[in-house]
Image (cartoon, helix red, strand yellow):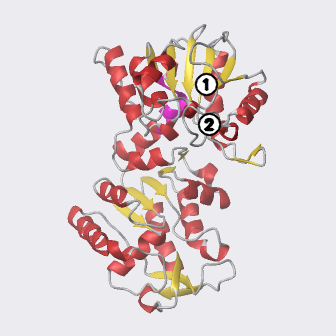
Amino acid sequence: MSFLRMSNFDLCKRRVLIREDLNVPIENGRITSTQRLDAALPTLQRACDAGAAVMVLAHRGRPQEGVFAASESLTLVAAWLSRKLAQPVPLLRDYLDGVTVQPGEVVLLENCRMNVGEKADDPALARRYAALCEIFVMDAFGVAHRAQASTHGVIQVVPMACAGPLLAAELDALGRALQAPTQPLLAIVGGSKVSTKLTLLKNLLTKVDQLIVGGGIANTFIAAMGHEVGTSLYEPDLLDAARQILDQAQACGTELPMPCDVVVATACSAEAMPIVKRIEAIKPTEMILDIGPQTAANYAERIAAAGTVVWNGPVGVFEFDAFGKGTEVLAQAIAGTKAFSIAGGGDTLAAADKYGMAEHIDYISTGGGAFLEFLEGKVLPAVAALEARAEVCTGGVVEVHF
C-alpha cells in the first residue's frame, strides 16, 4: 500500500480538515464507550500541537440527509474533546460555506451524514468540504470502505490529501499481517453465520497456512461433514458451500482443522448446564455453544507455533461464562504467542477485554466493517483514493509501507 501520511506535511498555520470515526454509542445522555474517541485523540492533539487550524469532520448514526436530528448530534463528542484537549472545541452546525478557526484551535463540524449528498458521494458536496481546507487528513479507518463525500470524494478534489496516524497504523498492521506476514499465517474466523463471512473464508484460504473457524460457522461445517448438530445455530442451505470450502482448503494445502469435541447444552442461557461431548455423540436435543477442551488445546498449540495470527470472532457464546472457555483459551494463546497478532470486530474486542488480553495483542483494529472488507480482499474506496493521490503528488514515485 502506497500513501502519503500526515507526518509528510508541515501543518503549521495550515487549515487542516480531519475525517475521524467518532460514531460513539450514547445512552441516557452519556457516552457509554469512548474507544473511538480515545483512538482519534492522538491525531487531533498532534495536529493541534503542530500549529494547524483543525477542523474535525465526523458522523454519528444514520440520520436523514438534509434534516437536523438532535438525537444524532455530536454535542457530547464536542464536550468530551473540549475536556481532553484542554481547550474549547465548539460544534459548528453551519459550516459548508466556510469555517473560522485559528492555528492551534480545534472545531468539530456537525454530523456530516446530515449533509445532502454525503452518502451518494456527491461531487458538489465533496468540493465544499475541500474548499474548507488546504490539507485533508483521512483518519477514519472505520468508514474507509464507504465511498462517501467525506471519505472518498473530498480526497479526489482537495489540494492535498493524506492518511492520518490512526488510519496509517491500521493499514500498516493489516499489510504486515496479510501482505508481508511472518509464516506460518493463521487466521481465526468466528461468528454466527457462514453467509456473512463466506467471501472472507474463500479469500483467506488462498492467503493463510491455517484457518480456524468457530461459533455458528463451525457448526455449519460440522453438519457438512455429516455430524448431528441438534438444535445448534447453523445454516443448512450452506452445507454445500461449506463442503466446497473444505475441498478448496485441501486443494490449496491450507489446514482447516475441525473441532473434535464441543460443549453442548439444551438451552442457550447463563443457567444452562454445559456438557463436553465428542462431535460424534451430539444428540438431536442439544446445541453446540463452545469448542471443547481438547479442541481448544489443539488450537492453542497451533497459535503458539504461528508467525502471524489474525483473529476475527469468538469461537463460542463467550457472553455466558460456561460457554466462554474456548474463546478464553484462544485469547490467552494469542496474548502469549511471539507471533505478530491483530484482532478486529466488535465481539472479538469484547472477548479480548473480558479476558484481560487486549493489551497483549499487537494490534487492535477499530475498523469493524472495513476490517472485514480488507480481509475479504476488497478495495477500500478511501484507501484507493489516497493511493491515487500519492501517485499524482510524487510523480509516480511512491514509498511502499508495510
Q: Viewer-proximal residue, 166 or 388?
A: 388
Q: Viewer-proximal residue, 81 or 163?
A: 81
Residue that label 2 marks: 22
Secondary structure type for disc 1: strand
Query: Given the current orientation, which residue lies at the most extreme left position?
Result: 251
Q: What residue lies at 65% left-to-right and 72% top-to-bottom?
A: 320
Vertical comparison of 49 with 175: above or below: above
State the image coordinates of residue 102 (x, y, percent, origin top left).
67, 9
Q: Amino acid at mark 2?
A: Leu
What's the mark number on residue 329? Answer: none
Q: Quadrant of residue 84?
A: top right
Q: Main secondary structure of the magenta part?
A: helix
Apparent side of residue 84 relative to residue 121 in the rendered image (left or right): right
The image quadrant where one finds the N terminus is: top left
Q: Quadrant of residue 348?
A: bottom right
Vertical comparison of 384 with 334: above or below: above
Q: Amino acid at mark 1?
A: Val
The image quadrant where one finds the C terminus is: top left
Q: Are marks 2 and 1 in contact (CB under 8 Å)?
A: yes
Q: Is residue 167 magenta?
A: yes
Vertical comparison of 185 with 167: above or below: below
Q: What span is colored magenta in the figure?
A: 162-170
Q: What residue lies at 40% left-to-right and 17% top-to-bottom?
A: 157
Apparent side of residue 250 relative to residue 362 in the rendered image (left or right): left
Q: What residue lies at 60% left-to-right and 66% top-to-bottom?
A: 328
Vertical comparison of 293 with 383: above or below: below
